[in-house]
Image (cartoon, rainbow, N blue to C red):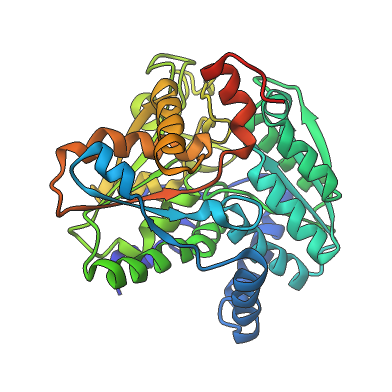
Amino acid sequence: MTKFETVPDARGHFGPYGGMFVPETLMTALQQLEAEYAEARRDPAFREELRDLLANFVGRPTPLYFAERLTERLGGAKIYLKREDLLHTGAHKINNAIGQILLARRMGKTRVIAETGAGQHGVATATVAARFGFECVIYMGAVDMERQALNVARMRFLGAQVVPVTAGQATLKEAVNEAMRDWVTNVRSTHYILGTAYGAHPYPMMVRDFHRVIGDEARRQILQREERLPDLLTACVGGGSNAIGLFYAFLNDENVRMVGVEAGGRGISRGEHAARFQGGRLGVLQGARTWLLADEDGQVEGTHSVSAGLDYAAVGPEHCWLRDLGRAEYDFATDDEALDAFRTLAEVEGIIPALESSHAIAHVIKVAPAMRPDQIIIANLSGRGDKDVNQAAKILLGVDAE
């Protein structure tokens, strides 16, 4: 067994990161969840039901698509896209939501809550709640509700109550705060379907495990197509769930580089970005010890990204550990670079990516021309851009798409 497969430890630590930094009122719920997940992952019936739902409800496996025209446009490496945007609800988020709703049912819960930034996790949670007959409440920053109005409507059509959060920056961090307050109050009846590889143990481990199907599929698919492994994997990193889902199956393949792409916003200066590894420090936020954007006194700083899903002050603890080990690297793309990638992929390949995923495409545009034609890149297309069309139209075209 390798070092990558032995983390987190029994207390939820990835090296110095992770852990369980929560109010005492939530410790019992987290311990119950940890125990239930440990039992479920050994249960053949649980694994089979999850497999069936992923295949017949969610739409797995997703294609590994050779982006031929983008490859020709850029020159250099061959570019493949892992098409998570083709899943039911339009993003990778439903892989985790399906797994967690099955755990909630096993624990006898009747209500689920979630936070959401870009709205894709909120839509995924509302979808699985509708499928299994759960009451559902989604917390979303008021700023994000405005720029992701389509997803707000989708959640409401699916029967969820969407609660606007107006505190602070009124974005993802504040939505997490409100979801945690709700959970503390209603812990006996409620399960919190946390949407990324972050938070208190066991969430980073559990969310990673539910998303590792991305990398498991991509590994099989590229070996079938090219008869060898890729040279580079890349994915956007907010909390980091789609990236760790892609990376995990390749961690022991030393010749496969991995690059996570954070939100560079308007540039790396205070309050203008969400690139934690570029301007952050070690601290504790919302359940975990990790790398985050905070000042000298430990106060969390404001963030900015054109992408609501990447606009978060902290990053998943496993990503911090992989960076320390030198196994994964972390770059950033600015708003302008992401918007250019959004437009390029749409015009060249006929695929409109989510603004989150556009950060990964921006990295591909940056590095592919300098690579050899016999080299291979896999970029995780974590979601589709329907939700972002109106926002992008205002910025790029100067019109309102609605």
Q: Position of residue 23 (x, y in %)?
A: 68, 44
- Towards the viewer: 347 or 129: 347
Q: How many marks?
A: 0
Quadrant placement of the C terminus? top right
Can the viewer see residue 285?
A: yes
Q: Does residue 375 sit above or below 288 in this rendering? A: below
Quarter of the image where one finds residue 338 = top left
Q: Is residue 231 left or right of residue 385?
A: left
Q: Is residue 311 above or below residue 129?
A: above
Horizontal arrangement in the rendering, residue 193 relative to residue 230 (left or right): right
Q: Residue at x 38, y 25 (%)?
A: 337
Compared across the picture, whether 305 is left or right of 127 comes to left
Q: Position of residue 232 (x, y in %)?
A: 25, 51
Is residue 123 shown above or below 34?
above
Q: Position of residue 30 (x, y in %)?
A: 65, 58
Q: Nearer the viewer, residue 328 or 264?
A: 264
Q: As rendered, which of 90 and 330 lies closer to the eye?
A: 90
At horizontal 64% and vertical 36% (from top left) the residue drawn is 387
Residue 178 in sight in this render: no
Q: Quadrant of residue 332?
A: top left
Extreme residue in the bottom direction: 44
> Where is residue 244 drawn, in percent x and y?
42, 53
Query: Which residue sits at x=79%, y=38%?
Result: 153
